Amino acid sequence: MKFGAFFMADFIETILIAALIATLFFRGWQVPYLQSDGFHMPWGSFHALPRFRYDQLMRLGWKYMLPISILNIFVTALVLLII
């Protein structure tokens, strides 16, 4: 019984920390600049969020993000070797 309470306290702590961070740092549950008729940015407003299809996200991940991340690993290793 004691272990169950410990695990439940761990989950409750995670939820409370997420709620505090969302409230204090991200202005609560509201999305910044979102009004009832769309987004109102300082440089203009738009009424639809850009949406990606699954195949577009997969293409972005495999063709662009994976090579950039591998390059980042090599550049970081090179910098660590130089320093």
Image: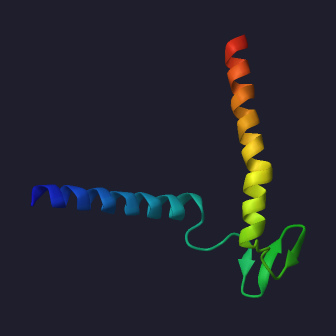
Residue 28 position by quadrant: bottom right
Quarter placement of the C terminus: top right
Q: Nearer the viewer, residue 48 or 53?
A: 53
Query: Which residue is rendered at x = 81% and y = 75% of the image?
Result: 40
Looking at the image, the residue that sits furthest to the bottom is 37
Quarter placement of the N terminus: bottom left
Q: Nearer the viewer, residue 30 or 62?
A: 62
Looking at the image, the residue that sits furthest to the right is 43
The image shows residue 80 at horizontal and vertical percentages of 67, 18
Q: What colour scheme was applied to this rendering of the protein? A: rainbow
Q: Is residue 52 above or below residue 70?
A: below
Query: How many numbered discs?
Result: 0
The image shows residue 70 at horizontal and vertical percentages of 72, 37
Q: Nearer the viewer, residue 72 or 30?
A: 72
Query: Which residue is rendered at x = 15% and y = 55% of the image?
Result: 3
Query: Which residue is rendered at x = 60% and y = 66% of the image?
Result: 27
Q: Is residue 83 visible?
A: no
Q: Is residue 11 visible?
A: yes
Looking at the image, the residue that sits furthest to the left is 1
Query: Which residue is rendered at x = 75% and y = 49% of the image?
Result: 65
Q: Nearer the viewer, residue 37 or 62?
A: 62
